[in-house]
Amino acid sequence: MATQFVKLSSKNQLTLPRSIVKHFPGMRYFEIAERNNEVVLRPARMVVHGDALERVREKIRDLGLSEEMVAEAVKSVRKAK
């Protein structure tokens, strides 16, 4: 594959070339990281919020915590900030 160049905008945005994006049909989100002084871009796997939220709720139930206990913990952390 030939090297392509993109320009960083004044708002720190890049536009991905169509010739690259066509290899990732339907992808709307990408992970970006710095590795060995290079920028690495990968398609992101998105987690459906409902599924993740249900797993959190299951964990809370498994730990024997009540909604009130969780609410109090959240309130306490927010006050500490």
Image (cartoon, rainbow, N blue to C red):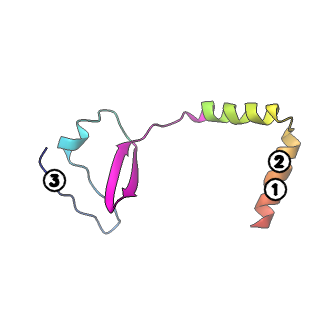
Quarter holding residue 21: top left
Residue that carries the numbered disc 3 in the rendered image:
4
Q: Secondary structure at mark 1?
A: helix
Q: Is 37 rendered above or below residue 52?
A: below
Residue drawn 13% across and 43% down? 1
Q: Residues within 10 Å of mark 2 (few under 14, many from 20)?
A: few
Whether tag 2 and tag 1 are in contact, CB under 8 A, the answer is yes
Q: Is residue 41 left or right of residue 47?
A: left
| Amino acid marked by disc 2 | Ala
Q: Is residue 30 magenta?
A: yes
Q: What residue appears at the point 82 percent right and 47 percent down from the top-left corner? A: 71
* Front: mark 3 or 1: 3
Q: Earlier in the sequence, mark 3 or mark 1?
A: 3
Question: Magenta residues, as a range?
Answer: 29-50
Going by the numbered disc 3, the residue's amino acid type is: Gln
Which residue of the protein is positioned furthest toward the front in this rendering? 36
